[in-house]
Amino acid sequence: MVPQEVSMADEKKKTPVKKEAEGKKEPEVKKEAPVKKEEAPVKKGALSWYFNFNLLYRILIGLVLGALLGIIFGEKILWIAPFGALFVRLLKMIMMPIIFSTLVVGAASINPTVLGKVGVRIVLLYLVTSAFAVFVGLIMGSIFRPSAELATLAVGAAGKAAAKTPISTVLLNIIPTSIAQAVVNETVLQVIFFAIIFGVGISYLSLSKDKRLKTAGDTLVVVFDGIAEVMMRMVTGIMQYAPIGVLALVAEVFAKQGSKVAGSLAVVTIACFLGYAFHVIFVYGGLLVINKLSIKRFFRDAKNPFITAFVTRSSNGTLPVTIEAGKNLGIPRDIYAFSLPLGATINMDGTAIYQGVCAIFISMTVTGANFTLGQMGIIIVTATLASIGTAGVPGAGAIMLLMVLESVGLPVVEGSAVAGAYAMILGIDAILDMGRTALNVTGDLVCTTVVTKGMGMLDMKAWE
Ligand code: ASP
């Protein structure tokens, strides 16, 4: 199924598994492309000090400065917000073209059997890690037992009815009725679905004996290949602006939320962040170590999406950066092009931990008691399933929390104590969302990397 014209650097990384499966001649191997460096070549000029300074340090400085400015100046610093919005807009601008083009080329060049095998493993690992993450959240919540005095609850919190969407609707919604609408509404799962079958269609054209059809298929691959490459170049350029965008985004969050993280809400925040840290160290670290992959090497490329997710609070928005990291980690394009956009939508470990902790906070606050083991089981199932079909956008986790609460008999009804406790969580949602999104994105990369390694398809040269 490999159109010979696919000549991207990644194509040389096609694995023996695939070649065997296809029994076809190998794609022409072009010159070895070096693993991309995050830094631009040494620049000269007025801003050379900026461009030549390590990007990670620049971003970290932006992060710390942003937090300080937000805390010190409070709302007076809010004029800075458009600089953060600029960064988010730039990333979102290329999100759909990058998902679409990389997926089409990926699907057009992979053997469907391999796609199926890799796909099933990745989706299973996504679900298992998410379910485990809810468990981690429930443990953290049970240890810290956060709660608030009912008297301090926000009055008149707007209640929201949790949307009860049957699972059949969630699954049917993966199929777009209009691809244009799916792209415009940024419904990632629908775009993934269409791009995959479109790519598979192209690969059939490329294999055709009819010269006209073959040329048409091959031409389409070359076109989408070109678009994908241009998008990657754009990501590298946009990341040069990341330090300033990060500073502004963090300053905005701290200016608006900083003072709210007090008392009981601080306990919720600590419990969530300890849960996030536990998951990164033990679950992700463990998965990498078991698969004999260096944690340090992994984070050398995973740090950019981690930080970008932290400040943008959007897995979808971070996708261009995550995809660039996947490429640099030696994952073949036909895998990362499919698994990372999918992960951004269905794999949300950070969100799962947050659900566990916050559900306990709300239960402790409203009923004064923790959940029973049975209720915890229901929370694990609901939170894991709720993550499928929920977009990786800021605040999506808070909507999912409504469904989880509903499933254990704590519906958010206007004026109720549950609504008040929920409103308190919403007050600090931006801060909790930063950590959970960073984790969501890292989880996508870890799962994809270890499954790729397990199938013998990871380019180990990138790890030397
Ligand atoms: N912001 C998260 C993400 O984009 C989703 C959430 O709100 O939990 O992955």
Image: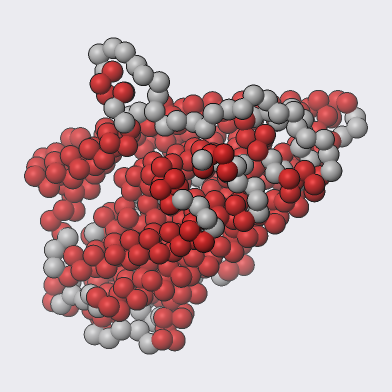
Question: Taking 165 as reference, is 303 left or right?
Answer: left
Question: Taking 369 as reference, is 5 left or right?
Answer: right
Residue 96 or 242: which is nearer the viewer? Answer: 242
Q: Position of residue 128 (x, y in %)?
A: 53, 67
Q: Residue at x 48, y 33 (%)?
A: 94
The colour scheme applied to this rendered structure is: secondary structure
Q: Position of residue 47 (x, y in %)?
A: 26, 18
Q: Residue at x 37, y 52 (%)?
A: 438
Q: Is residue 369 above or below residue 77?
A: below
The furthest residue to the left: 72
Residue 300 or 219: which is nearer the viewer? Answer: 300
Taking the image as drawn, is residue 213 in sight? yes
Taking the image as drawn, is residue 346 in sight? no
Question: Taking 121 as reference, is 230 left or right?
Answer: left
Q: Residue at x 31, y 31 (%)?
A: 54
Quarter of the N terminus within the rendering: top right
Q: Residue at x 38, y 32 (%)?
A: 239
Question: Taking 118 as reference, is 207 left or right?
Answer: right
Numbered circles on residues, count: 0
Q: Position of residue 454 (x, y in %)?
A: 62, 56
Q: Is residue 266 above or below residue 86?
A: below
Where on the picture, by quarter, is residue 401? bottom left
Where on the picture, by quarter, is residue 12? top right
